[in-house]
């Protein structure tokens, strides 16, 4: 059992970004920073994959 996981969940459950990472198909890194043995802050490194050409509308033009 991870002794700090419950505390992390309580502290960050109201953060919509962290609470919905799975829903958004998060791909990247989540760095949990500790202070005095307790989770204190989080750094999110979100990786964005390029869309396949077929997923982009044929009427859209880059930058418009």
Image: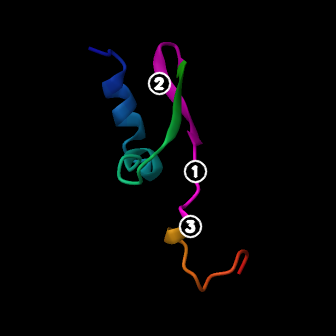
- Chosen colour scheme: rainbow
Which residue is painted at 39% across and 29% down in the image?
8
Inter-mark Cα distance, 3 to 1: 15 Å
Indicate which disc, 1 or 2, sits on the residue closer to the N terminus: 2
Instruction: Give residue 19's position: percent from left, percent from top.
Output: 38, 46
Q: Is residue 48 left or right of residue 15?
A: right
Q: Nearer the viewer, residue 45 or 6?
A: 45
Pointer 3: residues within 10 angstroms few (<14), some, or many (20+)? Answer: few
Residue highlighted by disc 3: 53
Residue 46 in magenta? yes
**Which residue is tagged 1?**
48
> How far apart, in angstroms, are the residues tagged by discs 1 and 2?
26 Å
| Residue 55 position (above or below residue 64) | above
Residue 15 in percent (x, y) is at 44, 47
Q: Earlier in the sequence, mark 2 or mark 3?
A: 2
Magenta region, residue range: 35-52
Residue 51 counted in the magenta span? yes
Of circles 3 and 1, the one toward us is 3
For numbered disc 3, what is the local secondary structure? helix
Query: Any mark on residue 39, and which?
Result: 2
Q: Secondary structure at mark 2?
A: strand
Tell me which residue sits at (41%, 35%) in the image: 11
Q: Secondary structure at mark 1?
A: loop
Mark 1 neighbour class, 10 Å CA radius: few under 14, some 14 to 19, many 20 or more: few
Left or right side of 38 for 56: right
Residue 44 pos. (x, y %): 56, 39
């Amino acid at each position: 059992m991870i002794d700090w996981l419950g505390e992390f969940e309580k502290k960050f459950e109201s953060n919509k970004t962290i609470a919905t990472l799975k829903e958004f198909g998060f791909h990247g890194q989540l760095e949990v920073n500790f202070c005095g043995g307790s989770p204190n802050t989080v750094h999110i490194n979100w990786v964005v994959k390029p869309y396949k050409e077929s997923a982009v509308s044929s009427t859209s033009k880059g930058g418009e």
